[in-house]
Image (tube, grey):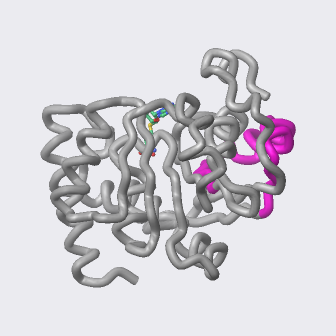
Amino acid sequence: MLTQPQQNKFNQLSDLLRKENQTHNLTRITDPKEIEQRHFTDSLAAVDIINKLAAEIKNPRIIDIGSGAGFPGLALAIAMPNIQLTSVEATGKKINFQKQAAAELELTNVTLINKRAEDIANDPAHREQYDFAVSRAVAGLAILSELCIPFVQPGGYFLAWKGRKADEEIKNATQAIKLLGGQITDQTPYALEEETESSLQIITIRKITPTPKKYPRPYKAIKQKPL
Ligand code: SAH
């Protein structure tokens, strides 16, 4: 449930996204109703999962990898003021949008980083420093796992938003997840409004053991030869 001030922030974010999208192609989704469903509601599909897994943690540290215009990260930061969000995005204009949004919405729990994930994954300030890594629509699960799992501390979780190809992606990523120290512990289906048949799900991967130092590899190697 969102409070009225939170609902107001989502409305502000929607307005800002549509306004900025006219000059800076940030997202394909531009209709207000669609923004609400496919950006906001979709991002918030993880709220219950995070609350359940982080019940003991007062201020869960969450890193969003490849956050684009801020999804799922900014939406989670609005809905869950107790989290500490770090949002990582390679493209400058997208991080600039998030910067503007975080300022206008007065989000005090957000840190923005304009870097590639693999370039900060060995930084002690970030490696294995997070309770959760989250990511939506960035890469197939094998590649994505190498980009995300190094940030998660053992005992923490990586949550991946996936669609109809989830089972195939899981099959192709099983080896990678294991090598990186993870294990799939859950698949949570969810639906957006007005969908009778949904193929959306959040895959929960628990970090069991530390990630070997050699991961992540440089992006070229990650892409050419997924684990
Ligand atoms: N998560 C957002 C954006 C998806 S588009 C959403 O669901 O709406 C994928 C984004 O990931 C792009 O903005 C791209 O710049 C970013 N990206 C891809 N690889 C990345 C990497 N290795 N590190 C950081 N950002 C990356």
Residue 149: quadrant of the picture: top right
Q: Residue at x 47, y 64 (%)?
A: 192
Q: Is residue 186 above or below residue 20?
A: below
Residue 80 at x, y percent in the picture:
42, 73
Residue 174 highlighted magenta (yes or no): yes
Q: Is residue 139 above or below residue 14?
A: above
- Point out the image quarter for the N terminus: bottom left
Q: Is residue 54 above or below residue 101?
A: below
Kindly tell me whether residue 199 is visible in this rendering. no
Residue 76 at x, y percent in the picture:
42, 64
- Which residue is most to the front? 124
Q: Nearer the viewer, residue 190 or 159?
A: 159
Residue 84 highlighted magenta (yes or no): no
Bounds of the magenta segment: 159-185
- Point out the image quarter for the C terminus: top right
Left or right relative to 28: residue 215: right
Residue 48 at x, y percent in the picture:
56, 75
Q: Residue at x 39, y 41 (%)?
A: 113
Q: Residue at x 14, y 33 (%)?
A: 23
Residue 3 at x, y percent in the picture:
30, 84
Left or right relative to 181: residue 4: left
Number of marks in picture = 0
Q: Residue at x 29, y 64 (%)?
A: 108
Residue 37: quadrant of the picture: bottom left
Kindly tell me whether residue 115 is visible in this rendering. yes
Left or right relative to 54: residue 103: left
Q: Nearer the viewer, residue 37 or 174?
A: 174
